[in-house]
């Protein structure tokens, strides 16, 4: 109920009322609001909201197992199209930079650089 006092986290989509928040807020902030969990993990970059705004056809490919062209010396490698909202650190920054233009891909069995961003032409189902 009480939608006038509802806060919606831009990072994860959780919600709470201004008076239920710890510490309570007097007003709904005019700027983006992030819950404590998102602030503590650094998820205040807007990536989660941007991923939710992607077209359904793009989001439907998350978790798709494929072969990805890893580089000239690696050829085609087994991989998965990864949901950028599940990432942290450098993979998260990489995903945010290329979101909507390229897919974040995780290469199975690769320890040196398991994440890359690739265009559709570099992916094979």
Image: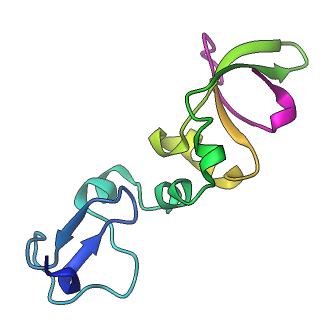
- Residue ID at (13%, 76%): 1
Q: Nearer the viewer, residue 23 or 54?
A: 54
- Residue ID at (55%, 43%): 84
- Indicate left or right for 68 with 71 as reference: left
- Residue ID at (50%, 62%): 46
Reply yes or no: does residue 79 show up in magenta. Answer: no
Q: Position of residue 95 (x, y in %)?
A: 63, 46
- Residue ID at (82%, 13%): 74
The residue positioned farthest toward the top in the image shown: 109
Relative to 49, residue 120 above or below = above
Q: Position of residue 71 (x, y in %)?
A: 85, 22
Q: Nearer the viewer, residue 59 or 80?
A: 59
Q: Position of residue 19 (x, y in %)?
A: 9, 78
Q: Position of residue 120 (x, y in %)?
A: 81, 36
- Indicate left or right for 28 with 85 as reference: left
Relative to 89, residue 9 above or below = below
Q: Nearer the viewer, residue 43 or 2?
A: 2
Reply yes or no: does residue 109 show up in magenta. Answer: yes
Relative to 4, residue 99 above or below = above
Q: Quadrant of the C terminus?
A: top right
- Indicate left or right for 84 with 73 as reference: left
Give the colour scheme of this rendering.
rainbow
Q: Which residues are magenta?
A: 107-125
Based on the displayed image, in which of its 4 quarters is residue 34 positioned? Answer: bottom left
């Amino acid at each position: 109920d009480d939608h006038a006092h509802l806060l919606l986290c831009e990072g994860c989509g959780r919600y709470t009322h201004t008076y239920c928040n710890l510490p309570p807020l007097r007003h709904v902030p005019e700027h983006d609001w992030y819950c404590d969990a998102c602030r503590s993990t650094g998820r205040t970059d807007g990536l989660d909201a941007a991923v939710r705004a992607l077209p359904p056809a793009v989001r439907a490919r998350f978790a798709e197992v494929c072969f990805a062209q890893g580089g000239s010396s690696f050829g085609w490698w087994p991989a998965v199209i990864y949901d950028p909202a599940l990432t942290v650190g450098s993979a998260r920054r990489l995903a945010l930079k290329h979101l909507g233009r390229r897919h974040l891909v995780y290469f199975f069995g690769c320890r040196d650089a398991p994440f890359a961003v690739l265009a559709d032409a570099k992916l094979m189902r």
